[in-house]
Image (spheres, rainbow, N blue to C red):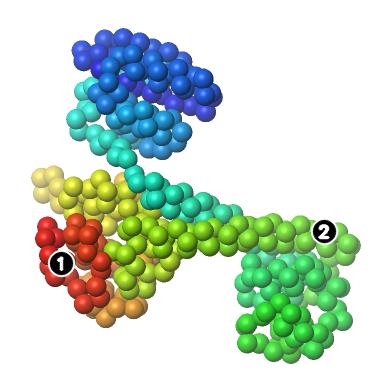
Amino acid sequence: MFVGWDWGNSTHDMTIIDDNGGKVHRSAVPHTEAGITAAINRLAEFGDPSELPVAIETTRGLVVDRLTVAGHPVIPVHPNAFHAARPRWGAARAKTDPGDSFKLADYARTDGHRLPRLQPVTAATRELQALTRARGDQLELRIAAVNQLAALLDQYWPGGKAVFAALHSAIAIAFLTRYPTAESAAKLTAKQLESFCRKHGYSGRRSGSELLERLRAAPIPDSSIGDEIITHVITAQVGVVRALQTAVDGLDKVIADKVTTHPYAPLLKDLPRIGTLNLAQIIGEVGPILERATSFEQFAAETGIAPVTRASGKSHVVGFRHATNRRARQALHTWIDNSRRGDPWAQQRYVDARARGQRHPHALRTLGRSWLRIIWACWRTQTPYNPQHRTARNLPNAA
């Protein structure tokens, strides 16, 4: 038997079919504890959960977690692939929730042997993944908030933006909290500014005179809005930046604690120029791929480092791989680019690729494939990376 689960925010739809494609059961599932529990119990009535695969158009979420814990093999179906398969059930490509749950079940029946199934990920890896993704979300919000603050300062007080380079830094936030308008800083002296910087632990190596010169050199706004209103506007946005930066800093501390105790950390922590945060990102995003990959080719493809070959007749094109785990690829690219700045072997590989006419992104992926072979070898042999091991061949039983 096969199950199709059409998920939604408030209501899901579940259909069970037999090996011949006949409908055995269909029901709407409310997105409540009672509804999901009843649905999983209902599935248990049709046999061993390990022999009842569930096709669903997502790879994560509450429903996926509950189905996995219950013991069901979960077959994630990419929405684009499912959309392309719709004509097999009718040229009109009709779409309803009950219809989609049936089609998903039928798709699993006919094509399930070709589709990968979600593999359980270790709890420690999932925790790091959740933390790094949450940090990434908060960082995006902080960048947007800082851009909004910069725009407000450009309009109402350019001097406040010019004093310190990073508007999200503790010293910049403290300064804008104390001096939110040009009027509030009109009588500020170099000595007062130096005293302010010492009080807040400023480490920018700029004297009070230099900082004050930056402030005074900025253009003076001529706004019809009163100073009190500008104070409220700037202070409100500074508060948003402060809150988001506090959240990012808090997550950084938790991530640093978690990554040091992760079982994969000893394997990768000595890779050149890999920082604590980047190590956590790689473990969280690349770790699950390592856990399920059965070959280096699969590992390189799922991380987006390997290219895609399209050949037909006289046409033969090797191009960029778009369909991949983008978070894993971004985590790897960040480190790969850093590695060439701290490792002569990596730098030479990059230079050789550039000399062959490859552009920077292509050269990074070429270097990346060399690094992935080493990571794959470390993983397969459970051997920590040693800087003296420049190739995977130096690691025993790496095949």
Residue drawn at 42 percent across, 13 percent down: 27
| Quadrant of the frame with the C terminus | bottom left
Q: CA distance from mark 2 to mark 1?
A: 61 Å
Q: Quadrant of residue 354?
A: bottom left
> In this figure, which residue is indicated by the disc labeled 2?
232
* Residue 361 horizontal side relative to residue 230, left or right: left
Q: Which mark is residue 239?
A: none
Q: Is residue 29 above or below residue 372?
A: above
Q: Percent from the top left, x then y, of residue 229? A: 86, 59
Q: Residue at x 40, y 60 (%)?
A: 261
Report which residue position mark 1 lands on.
395
Q: Determine the residue positioned at 58% across, 62% down.
A: 249
| Closer-to-camera residue (207/41) | 41
User: Which amino acid type is shown beneath numbered disc 1?
Assistant: Leu
Q: Position of residue 257 (x, y in %)?
A: 47, 61
Asked if residue 77 can be seen in this view, the reply is no
